[in-house]
C-alpha cells in the first residue's frame, strides 16, 4: 500500500496511507516530507502454541479413529467341524479373537497361536483341527463347514472368494461347503451356541420336515446334518 510521509520523529516517520489512516513506520527519515513510499505488507503472525495444540488434537483424533477401527469387529468366519470356532476380524482383515464353540475347540485354540489374515488363520485352524488328526477312512473327506457373517451393513463376499482360493491352493479341495449367512443368523446362532452355517443347515432340514426338532438337528454330527440337508 502506498503512503505519504507527514513528518520524521522518534527515529522513524509518520505517514498517511491511501485509506486516510495515520501510522508510524521505522526508517524513511532520509526521504523528504511529502515523499510517496510503498508500505510493506504486515507479516502474518503465527501462534505456535495454538498451532501445536491444534496439531496434537488432530493426532489424538486420528489415533482414536485408528484404534476404534482396529479393535471393532467387522466380520466373522465360523469353522465348523468336530472342533468348531468363531473367528472375529477387524476392518484391516486381521484376527481380533478366536472363540471356541465346543470343548474340542477349546483344547485346539489353547495350543494354537492364530494370527494374520483370514486366509492364514482359516488354513492354519483347519490344518490343525482336521488334517493333522487321525481320520477314519470311512470319514474321508472330512466334514467341514465354513460360514461367513458380515457385520451390519458390510459384505463378506470378497472373503468368501479369497478363502475358497486359499483352500484350493492348499490342496483342500474336498472342503466344498462355503456358506454366506445373514446377520440375523449370526445373532440367533450365538444364542443357541452353534455356528450360523449349522443353524442354516438345520433350518433347511426343518423346511423339508416340519415335525423335526431344531435342537435335535443341531445336535447331529456335522456329517449327518449335511447329509440330511441335501
Image (cartoon, rainbow, N blue to C red):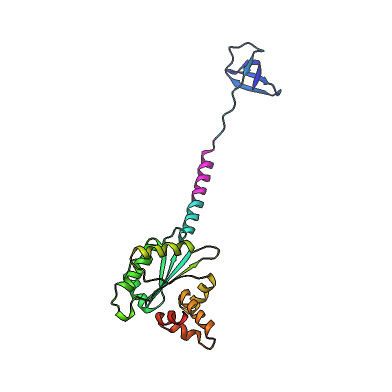
Give the quarter of the image for residue 30.
Answer: top right
* Residue at the top extreme of this rendering: 32
Q: Main secondary structure of the magenta part?
A: helix
Residue 53 lies in the magenta stretch:
yes
**Quadrant showing the N terminus:** top right
For the point 57% across and 32% down, which residue is it?
44
Q: Nearest the camera: 34 or 81? A: 81
Q: Nearest the camera: 230 or 226? A: 230
Q: Where 25 falls versus 50 (above or below)?
A: above
Whether residue 178 sits left or right of residue 137 in the image: it is right
* Residue at the bottom extreme of this rendering: 211
Q: Position of residue 92 (x, y in %)?
A: 45, 58
Q: Nearest the camera: 95 or 136? A: 136
Q: Where 94 falls versus 198 (above or below)?
A: above
Residue 195 lies in the magenta stretch:
no
Whether residue 205 sits left or right of residue 83 in the image: it is right
Q: Magenta stretch?
A: 46-59
Q: Where 95 falls versus 140 (above or below)?
A: above
For the point 59% across and 18% down, which residue is it?
12
Whether residue 163 sits left or right of residue 132 in the image: it is right
Question: Is residue 159 among what the camera can see?
Answer: yes
For the point 51% across and 45% down, which residue is it?
55
Give the quarter of the image for residue 227.
Answer: bottom left
Give the quarter of the image for residue 164.
Answer: bottom left
Q: Position of residue 182 (x, y in %)?
A: 53, 70
Q: Nearest the camera: 56 or 147? A: 147
Amino acid at each position: 500500500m502506498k503512503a505519504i510521509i507527514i513528518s520524521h520523529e522518534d527515529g522513524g516517520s509518520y505517514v498517511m496511507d491511501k485509506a486516510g489512516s495515520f501510522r508510524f513506520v521505522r526508517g524513511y527519515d532520509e526521504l523528504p516530507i511529502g515523499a510517496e513510499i510503498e508500505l510493506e505488507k504486515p507479516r502474518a503472525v503465527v501462534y505456535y502454541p495454538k498451532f501445536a495444540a491444534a496439531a496434537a488434537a488432530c493426532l489424538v483424533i486420528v489415533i482414536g479413529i485408528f484404534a476404534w477401527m482396529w479393535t471393532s469387529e467387522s466380520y466373522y468366519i465360523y469353522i465348523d467341524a468336530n472342533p468348531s470356532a468363531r473367528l472375529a476380524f477387524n476392518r484391516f482383515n486381521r484376527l481380533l479373537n478366536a472363540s471356541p464353540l465346543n470343548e474340542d475347540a477349546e483344547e485346539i485354540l489353547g495350543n494354537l497361536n492364530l494370527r494374520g489374515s483370514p486366509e492364514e488363520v482359516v488354513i492354519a485352524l483347519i490344518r490343525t483341527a482336521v488334517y493333522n488328526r487321525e481320520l477314519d477312512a470311512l470319514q474321508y473327506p472330512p466334514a467341514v463347514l465354513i460360514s461367513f457373517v458380515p457385520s451390519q451393513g458390510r459384505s463378506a463376499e470378497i472373503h468368501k472368494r479369497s478363502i475358497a482360493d486359499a483352500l484350493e491352493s492348499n490342496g483342500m479341495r474336498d472342503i466344498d461347503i462355503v456358506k454366506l449367512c445373514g446377520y440375523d443368523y449370526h445373532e440367533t446362532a450365538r444364542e443357541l451356541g452353534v455356528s450360523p452355517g449349522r443353524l442354516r443347515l438345520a433350518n433347511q432340514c426343518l423346511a423339508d420336515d416340519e415335525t423335526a426338532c431344531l435342537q435335535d438337528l443341531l445336535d447331529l454330527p456335522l456329517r449327518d446334518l449335511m447329509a440330511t440337508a441335501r
